[in-house]
């Protein structure tokens, strides 16, 4: 069995929550989600997934935990280890399904130009982009600013945002979709 993600501390709390989830305890699932989902998303991003891909994969991982909680055996692996193995497997499955290598951050072919070398004026361009994004963000409603900040700057999963703001998940996703449409219209082809 693979070890847990680097830097993760195993506790009995996660195992106890999974045992309760096996009995379909929604409160236990919400508690586990709050503890584990941000860690899973970070782990997936360290494996090379983009923020959006990591968000989707995290949702899939947590759904799998809900569906298969009764299969967790604490004698075989710790709770976090079990969850991170699911995450790793979901990441591998996603990579196999994708035809586009860049969607999940795989290495570019050798003949691709090296974008990692910054041009001398890149710092100025970055500052200008940042100022434009900040100005565009100010034009969003306070509710939209909050969900954009939490989702993109704090990298919170959509479900965690919904829980923190006491909103339905669909409302959070709608606010994000509307905010991104407004930002795209305001910023155009910002690179």
Image (spheres, rainbow, N blue to C red):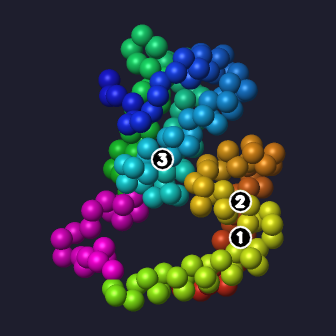
Q: Nearer the viewer, mark 3 or mark 1?
A: 3
Magenta segment boundaries in residue numbering: 99-118
Quadrant assignment for the N terminus: top left
Which residue is label 1 attached to?
179
Main SS of residues in magenta:
loop
Disc assigned to residue 147: 2
Rendered residue at 57%/79% (across/down):
130
- The reply to whether dot 2 and dot 3 touch (C-beta < 8 Å) is no
Q: Under tag 2, what secondary structure?
A: helix
Q: Residue at x 71, y 59 (%)?
A: 147
Q: Of the residues under marks 2 and 1, which one precedes in the sequence?
A: 2
Disc 2 crowd, CA 10 A, few/some/many (<14, 14-19, 20+): many
Point out the tag, 3 or 1, that comes first from the N-terminus: 3
Q: Is residue 157 magenta?
A: no
Relative image position of residue 160 (x, y in whole percent): 67, 45
Q: Position of residue 98 (x, y in %)?
A: 38, 57
Q: Mark 3 — residue?
A: 42
Number of the label disc, if any, that sits on residue 14 = none
Q: Is residue 94 visible?
A: no
Q: Residue furthest left?
A: 110
Q: Residue at x 69, y 80 (%)?
A: 136
Q: Residues within 10 Å of mark 1 (few under 14, many from 20)?
A: many
- Check contact, mark 2 vs mark 1: CB within 8 A: yes
Query: Which residue in the rendered view is the most extreme toward the top?
Result: 75
């Amino acid at each position: 069995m693979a070890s847990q993600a680097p830097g993760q501390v195993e506790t009995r709390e996660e195992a106890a929550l999974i045992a309760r989830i096996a009995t379909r305890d929604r409160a236990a699932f919400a508690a586990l989600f709050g503890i584990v989902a941000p860690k899973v998303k970070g782990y997936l991003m360290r494996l090379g997934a983009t923020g959006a891909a990591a968000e989707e994969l995290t949702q899939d991982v947590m759904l799998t935990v809900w569906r298969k909680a009764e299969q967790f055996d604490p004698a075989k692996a710790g709770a976090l280890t079990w969850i991170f193995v699911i995450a790793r497997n979901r990441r591998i499955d996603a990579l196999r399904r994708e035809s586009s290598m860049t969607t999940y951050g795989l290495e570019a072919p050798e003949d691709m130009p090296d974008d990692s070398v910054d041009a001398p004026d890149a710092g100025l361009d970055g500052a200008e982009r940042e100022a434009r994004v900040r100005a565009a963000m100010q034009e969003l409603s306070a509710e939209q600013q909050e969900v954009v900040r939490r989702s993109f700057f704090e990298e919170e999963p959509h479900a965690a945002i919904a829980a923190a703001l006491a909103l339905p998940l669909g409302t959070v996703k709608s606010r994000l979709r509307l905010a991104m449409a407004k930002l795209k219209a305001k910023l155009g082809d910002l690179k």
